[in-house]
Image (tube, rainbow, N blue to C red):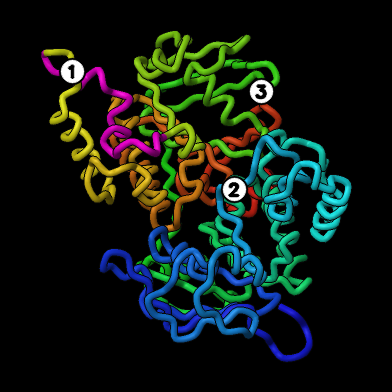
Amino acid sequence: MLDGGPERHALRLKGVTKMFGGVKALDNVDFEVLEGEVHCLAGENGCGKSTLIKIVTGVYTPEIAEQFELFGAKVEGMTPVQARNRGVSVIWQDLALFPNMTVAENIAFDEMVGLRPKGVDYRGMKERARAALARLGVTLDLDARLETQPIAQRQVVAIARALMNEARLIFMDEPTASLTQSETDKLLDIVRRLSADGVAIVFVSHRLAEVLEIAKRVTVVRDGHLIGVYPTEGMTQARLGELMTGHLLENTVGARDMSAAPVVFEARGLTVPGQFENVDLKIRAGEIVGLIGLLGAGRTELAHAMMGMSRPATGSMTLLGQPYAPASIRAAIDAGMAYVSEDRLQLGLHQKQSIEDNGAIAVLDTLLDRFGLISPTEKRDLIVGWVKKLGIKIGAPENAISTLSGGNQQKVVIAKWLATGPRLLILDSPTVGVDVGARAGIFRIARDLAEQGLAILLITDEVTEALYNSDRVLHMAQGRIVGAFDPRTTSVHAMEEAIYG
């Protein structure tokens, strides 16, 4: 926050209540942010965070608001355009950018809306975009199409666009969910720069370590109720997780010695030119092998080769002791492989389809009746069974998958693959965009599956996830396996030094 002088509020909300269909999404919630402050808004998915943000940005109107002030001015009824004009901006997780437009056009988009082509001052637009980036301490190719830029650069573009709108209060929704540790560090430096410049930042993240690193205070909301506002100094991840969920979430090393278990999958000297080379990998029955590394290390590319999505140029694979060289994803599935993609929204689910359709899509051929048609009863029984086994919270099986929280959507993806009866399950960044409580549930599922003999490859960016949820951890860098860790004898610090140092 700004140094010197009295503290001034960017936002003050008191006694806010919002209802949907008779259900209170927010119940008498207070929320305040100081100018120049980095403030975290924390809570599980569905707790009311997004509703609160949409009230501040004029998308929703609360039923009750005892006090609503922006920068000292009283607010009574506000549209999103009015909120933007008052200096409020939101950077949602999906960024809401235009991939086919240039970096400069995306940054200056709002000021160009409504102008005819001949009315656009492209030189001036680029100068203003360059100035916005300079304020962040960043230089980008202004003429590059956004689709050619990595996700970290797109985040910067979204922030720069907010600054073009003279934003004084910026909400950041899961800004680091798809970033590597080094990219996250750079983004947090930008947040600190904005804070020093007097911009108030509301940071929403499920990564509790970075919340405690970047924010001065954290407001915790649970089930639509304000739990409290806490200084981050002296706060621990365990305590913050407990406040968010209502119960203690313990991180303990659960690694076991699985060296005597039979080998389910083995790769020797596996190489896909330009992606990874000379990879040796063994995964045993009931074992969880963590695979960690920086973006571009080749982890997801290795998973794709294991699933028949690319053809290795050299090397060999075996599955259940037999030669394995799948020519397609279907061949890999039929052989006993399953893959939970890192991109749940684009590759893992059909958002407009129902929960039961998403859960059954990989095994439709097993649900046919005697007329060769999909049996509605068997499809319903299948998904209801997995909902019960995995503890998935749903309304009704016929509801759209988009009605579920991120954690429950991810559990449906896991159910989809478990329905195929796999012998090896690849979990590629399974907790991206998933809150702390749901993360714990997903890893409990993984551990239970391993206890039942399923071999699991866990790909993750987060050291703590790998350390606490794997039996062995492999470090991949520049397309090679360069190290291995035993979680029982390795610390978080030692792993971080090896991977990020």
For mark 3, give the secondary structure.
loop
For mark 2, give the secondary structure.
loop
> Dot 3 corresponds to which residue?
275
Residue at 15%, 24% in the rendered image: 375
For mark 1, give the secondary structure.
loop
Q: Can residue 190 be seen in the rendering of this structure?
A: no
Residue at 45%, 27% in the rendered image: 283
**Whole-percent x and y of residue 483?**
64, 35
Q: Amino acid at mark 3?
A: Gln
Quadrant of the image occupied by residue 456: top left
**Whole-percent x and y of residue 92?**
56, 54
Nearest the camera: 420 or 59? 59
> Dot 2 corresponds to which residue?
96
Work out which quarter of the rendered image holds the N terminus and state it.
bottom right
Eye-nearest disc, 3 or 2: 2
Q: Residues within 10 Å of mark 2 (few under 14, many from 20)?
A: few
Q: Whole-Å distance between the Cαs marked 1 and 3?
A: 42 Å
> Dot 1 corresponds to which residue?
373
Q: Can residue 448 be seen in the rendering of this structure?
A: yes
Residue furthest left in the image:
370
Q: Is residue 429 positioned above or below 29 on the image?
A: above
Q: Earlier in the sequence, mark 2 or mark 1?
A: 2
**Whole-percent x and y of residue 442?**
38, 46
Which residues, given as a range, are shown in magenta? Answer: 349-370
